[in-house]
Image (cartoon, rainbow, N blue to C red):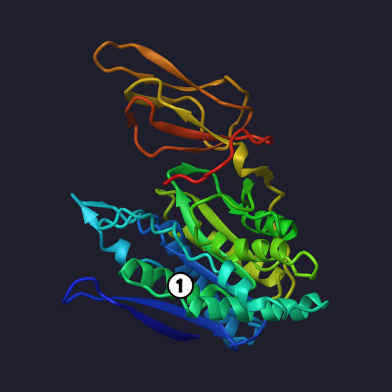
């Protein structure tokens, strides 16, 4: 293992943040796999999982079993990790700008497409190499004026040319699930079976330029721009949600790390045979994930739990007004899988409380929360 560090330019005097990447295998080996955790710096299941995964990869490298190149960034957001208010971590959004740390990544497709004009061939593999080079040049041309922008560019500097990109997050209270583009359905299925993900939410472009889509959306845009030239489907990139914020313990993290080793073996980054231990997850469109809203402000009590299959209109819980004692139901907006609940048990009127994923799209446009 070879550690590599990158210092971020500080926005204020006397302060600095540093990123660390752990490199396994030979530089330039394929497949190249990039994994990071803690981009939302209040989400710790993935951070602990990568600690366990690093130990497994240390042993695999010592045994000569790393056949690809594997990059681990064990804490992808030291800026957010340091941002606490009244003894509570705030690491989802930057406190200075209120920008979501997992939004606003650069769209490299326009500049890369301009560089590719007149250069693409009739060979898909040769074109893939040209696209990677053009994306590398486009990223090098980006300039950061803030520390958060520098963070985005530093992370993409390690990940932009990877074959597989896993950005590990968690939700509030949730089942293990993931987000992916439709470009590589066979890898989406493999990751579900390797990790035990109950649900894959699939969308080509969700809006907001999240980290995972910053790797897949440019390839889709370039395929549309150059329809007369064959282009591969590009990298597999996903946001992997390791359950909820309180699912942080060594036994769970060790199990998730072992499952990731199965995935790494199955895609050829590690030597050996892989046998995913889980069944397939549901593959639903992200537009089919519909939100339940609070009918009034008050205290939330649930009678359904993440992982339940529910019917449209089914009562999932109630919101009780603490002064009038009025008790109103929270109902499922569609039939499907109740996959997440909000963390807090108090709410304001109209606040989002839960999501149910169904097989048919029920919304479009900007599909990600802030």
Above-or-below relation of 318 to 268? above
Determine if residue 271 is in view: no
- Give the residue drawn at x 67%, y 66%: 222
Q: Residue 362: horizontal and vertical position, in percent?
A: 62, 33
- Give the residue drawn at x 40%, y 57%: 40
Of the pair 230 and 28, the residue shown nearer to us: 230
Above-or-below relation of 315 to 245? above
User: How would you rate the neighbour count of disc 1 (Cα within 10 Å): few for under 14, some for 14-19, many for 20 or more?
Assistant: many
Q: Secondary structure at mark 1?
A: helix
Above-or-below relation of 213 to 8? above
Of the pair 10 and 123, the residue shown nearer to us: 123
Question: Mark 1 highlights which residue?
Answer: 155
- Give the residue drawn at x 54%, y 63%: 214
Q: Residue 202: horizontal and vertical position, in percent?
A: 64, 49
Of the pair 201 and 161, the residue shown nearer to us: 161
- Give the residue drawn at x 61%, y 61%: 217
Q: Residue 333: horizontal and vertical position, in percent?
A: 56, 26
In this rendering, position of residue 253 left or right of residue 298: right
Q: Work out which residue is located at the far right of the displayed protein and give it.
A: 122
Q: Residue 204: horizontal and vertical position, in percent?
A: 64, 53
In this rendering, position of residue 95 left or right of residue 209: left
Determine if residue 158 is in view: yes
In this rendering, position of residue 353 left or right of residue 314: left
């Amino acid at each position: 293992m070879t550690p590599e560090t990158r210092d971020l330019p500080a926005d204020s005097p006397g302060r600095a943040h540093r990123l660390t990447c752990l490199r396994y295998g030979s530089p330039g080996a394929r497949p190249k796999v990039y994994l990071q955790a803690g981009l939302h710096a209040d989400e710790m299941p993935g951070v602990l999982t990568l600690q366990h995964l690093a130990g497994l990869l240390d042993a695999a490298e010592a045994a000569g079993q790393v056949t690809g190149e594997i990059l681990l960034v064990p804490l992808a957001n030291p800026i957010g990790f340091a941002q606490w208010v009244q003894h509570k971590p705030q690491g989802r959004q930057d406190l200075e700008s209120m920008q979501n740390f997992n939004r606003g990544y650069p769209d490299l497709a326009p500049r890369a497409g301009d560089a590719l004009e007149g250069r693409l061939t009739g060979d898909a593999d040769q074109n893939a190499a040209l696209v990677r080079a053009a994306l590398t040049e486009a990223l090098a041309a980006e300039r950061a004026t803030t520390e958060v922008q520098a963070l985005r560019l530093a992370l993409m500097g390690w990940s932009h040319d990877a074959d597989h990109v896993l950005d590990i997050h968690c939700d509030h209270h949730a089942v293990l699930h993931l987000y992916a583009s439709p470009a590589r359905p066979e890898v989406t299925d493999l990751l579900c079976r390797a990790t035990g993900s109950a649900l894959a939410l699939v969308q080509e472009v969700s809006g907001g330029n999240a980290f995972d889509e910053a790797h897949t959306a440019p390839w889709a845009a370039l395929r549309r721009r150059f329809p007369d030239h064959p282009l591969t489907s590009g990298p597999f990139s996903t946001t992997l949600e390791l359950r909820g914020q309180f699912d942080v313990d060594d036994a769970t993290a060790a199990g998730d790390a072992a499952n990731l080793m199965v995935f790494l073996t199955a895609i050829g980054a590690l030597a050996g045979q892989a046998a995913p231990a889980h069944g397939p997850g549901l593959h639903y469109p992200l537009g089919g994930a519909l939100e339940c809203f609070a009918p009034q402000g008050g205290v939330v009590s649930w009678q359904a739990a993440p992982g339940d299959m529910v019917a449209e209109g089914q009562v999932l819980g109630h919101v009780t007004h603490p002064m009038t004692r009025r008790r109103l139901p929270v109902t499922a907006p569609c039939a499907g899988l109740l996959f997440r609940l909000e963390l807090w048990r108090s709410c304001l009127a109209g606040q989002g409380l839960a999501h149910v994923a169904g097989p048919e799209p029920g919304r479009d446009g900007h599909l990600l929360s802030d």
